[in-house]
Image (tube, rainbow, N blue to C red):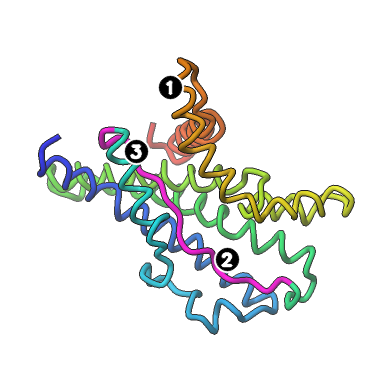
Amino acid sequence: MDFYGLMFTVSVWALPLLLAITFHEAAHGFVAWRLGDNTAYLQGRVSFNPFRHIDPFGTVIMPALLLLVSGGKMMFGFAKPVPVAFHRLRSPRRDMVLVALAGPGTNIALAILSSLLIHTLPLFPPDVAEWVFLNLRNSILLNMILAVFNMLPLPPLDGGRVAVGLLPRALAMPLARLERLGFIIILGGIFVLPWIGDKLGLDLNIFYLLVFEPAAYLSQWIFRLTGVF
């Protein structure tokens, strides 16, 4: 891929990614604030300013690596987690679930909105319409990937927090203790397992199986729901 091709590819992935992670994190902070914890609000994290949510690794390095490894076909990342003091929530166990669901729920809403906006493409000149379409298409896929990925039942992901909030205490507490290792497990699943599988001649890309394939299927469902295809 030449330099201009790479820049074009970055231009149609970067904006959807920044919007997806910014709205995701701002939604967590907003719901926590409304439910009694103003920690994120006081730190300026209930904001649509992406620079307040950027994580050097998750928002810059990891997406760039995935973009290069995939030959410009895929970008994924995450932002700095929004701080939530769960003990300050009015009903900590219930509200923890609501705060966790706010992020993926917002991503699903953004994906549906992006699909609806595809109907506006005839309003743009052809060259601009192509660029807008790629941004909207990538927005749908990225938002669904973020939603599916974050709903995996592993702390510190949102799905892990939902599981901890809903499971009986005897099951919730051991799962909650996994949070210390959760990030290492996630990175191992995304990067280390596929590398080991490649050396062994095995397909160990669990990220593709557990996240990308469901997200791609749900993206097609959103296209049909909004009348695009």
Asked whether residue 221 is in view, the answer is no
Quarter of the picture containing the N terminus is top left
Q: Is residue 179 left or right of residue 207?
A: right
State the residue position of label 1: 198
CB-based contact (under 8 Å), mark 3 and mark 1:
no
Q: Is residue 173 left or right of residue 129?
A: right
Amino acid on which disc 3 is placed: Met
Q: Which secondary structure dominates the residues rendered in magenta?
A: loop
Q: CA distance from mark 1 to mark 2?
A: 37 Å
Q: Residue at x 79, y 64 (%)?
A: 93
Give the magenta part as a residue range. 71-86
Q: Is residue 101 left or right of residue 197?
A: right
Q: Residue at x 65, y 64 (%)?
A: 99
State the residue position of label 3: 74
Question: 10 Å neighbourhood of mark 2: few (<14), some, or many (≥20)?
Answer: many
Amino acid on which disc 2 is placed: His
Which mark is nearer the camera, 2 or 3? 3
Disc on the earlier residue, 2 or 3? 2
Quarter of the picture containing the C terminus is top left
